Amino acid sequence: MSKVEQTDLIIEGKAKAIYNTTDPALIWVHNLDQATALNGKKKEAIANKAHYTNAISGLLFQYLTEQGIENHFIEQLNDSDVLVKKLKMAPVEVVTRNFASGSFERKYAVEHLKPLTPKVQEFYFKNDELDDPTLNDSQILALDLASAADIQTFRATALQVNEKLVALFAKINIMLVDFKIELGYLPDGRLILADELSPDNMRLVDQTTKESLDKDVFRKGTGEITAVYEIVLSRLQDALK
């Protein structure tokens, strides 16, 4: 267990509370027992949810570290808390889509879970007040949200993460339909993977039954979120032990 101690609250969001620590290079992330959807319009307290998001995210970050993808993860502290590197977060979210679902399926009237070739990448402006609008490369540059080199890093990192996660989930009979990542700047200016990797920000579907194993069950009211997260966690633990 780390000797770093939690200090003052930086910010509390929809799913996490972020704290400074006694080490200025590290922050303390507390996962909350609540689920949100539709940019916070749907919100509900859910017992033990923090345990699942924290455990799944920790396993996936450790796996990606072993696969050579640098990220912010330092240490899982307990059931709901994790220690990570303190970064300046980029205001751009990167979504990678392997199969048609969600907004992509609706906007383009394509068959559910249609394989997408090439993999689709989308950028979104991380801004709740604006409802996270979509971005293209020229908009990112014109709004001074990131540099051209950063955009290439966004794309490359998302594709690397996708390759590694698709392979891992395939071993446990799960399709990685799509997922969102965020990146942040280290003090030396390098961009690395950050935020969270869990069924909160990815779509996962059982390869055999095609049933959702992610936050869509909460978003659509089709099941218990902790029950499907438990399936994902159990399979990951078996695969990575």
Image (cartoon, rainbow, N blue to C red):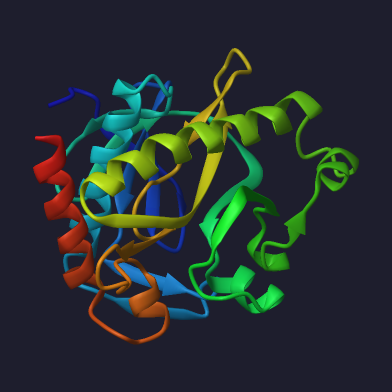
Q: Position of residue 53 (x, y in %)?
A: 27, 54
- In this view, the residue farthest toward the top is 188
Indicate whether 102 appears above or below 16. Answer: below
Indicate whether 218 appears above or below 72. Answer: below
Indicate whether 76 appears above or below 110. Answer: above
Q: Position of residue 199 (x, y in %)?
A: 34, 59
Res 204 visible: yes
- Relative to 78, is 9 on the left or the right? right
- In this view, the residue farthest toward the bottom is 221
Residue at 70%, 29% (x, y): give it.
Answer: 152
Q: Quadrant of residue 62?
A: top left
Q: Position of residue 66 (x, y in %)?
A: 29, 22
Q: Quadrant of residue 83?
A: top left
Q: Quadrant of residue 155?
A: top right
Res 78 visible: no
The N terminus, quarter of image: top left
- Relative to 98, is 169 on the left or the right? left
